[in-house]
């Protein structure tokens, strides 16, 4: 029986992929993978961090 192994990606091949699209990729152990989208909890934490940092930034720039 023949086993098909997935293609192993090199750094150069990965860097040649187009940037700025809606898809994100990672190379893990030579295999190209697409990480899962962030969940709701992650999004809330990110939003709270942004709000806190933005607030501090505005306070420091105004005084």
Image (cartoon, helix red, strand yellow):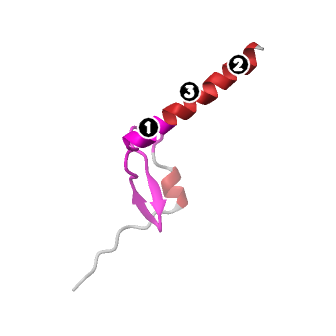
Question: Considering the image in quadrants, where does the N terminus appear?
Answer: bottom left
Image position of 18 with respect to 61: above or below: below
N-term mark: 1 or 3: 1
Location of mark 3 (residue): 51
Asked whether residue 20 appears in the rendered view, the answer is no
Q: What is the number of the mark on residue 12?
A: none
SS class, disc 2: helix
N-term mark: 3 or 2: 3
Front residue of 43/6: it is 43
Image position of 37 with respect to 11: above or below: above
At label 3, counting other C-alpha atoms closer than 10 Å, the crowd grade (few under 14, some 14-19, many 20 or more) is: few
- Relative placement, left or right, of 17 versus 60 is left
Extreme residue in the left direction: 1
Range drawn in magenta: 18-45
Location of mark 1 (residue): 43
Front residue of 5/29: it is 29
Residue drawn 48% across and 41% down?
19
Image position of 49 with respect to 30: above or below: above
SS class, disc 3: helix
- Relative placement, left or right, of 40 versus 26 is left
Location of mark 2 (residue): 59
Front residue of 32/50: it is 50
């Amino acid at each position: 029986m023949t086993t098909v192994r997935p293609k192993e990606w090199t750094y150069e091949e990965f860097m040649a992929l187009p940037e700025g699209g809606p898809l994100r990729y990672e190379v893990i152990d030579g295999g190209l993978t697409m990480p899962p989208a962030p969940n709701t909890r992650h999004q809330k934490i990110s939003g709270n961090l942004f709000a806190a940092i933005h607030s501090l930034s505005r306070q420091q720039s105004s005084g």
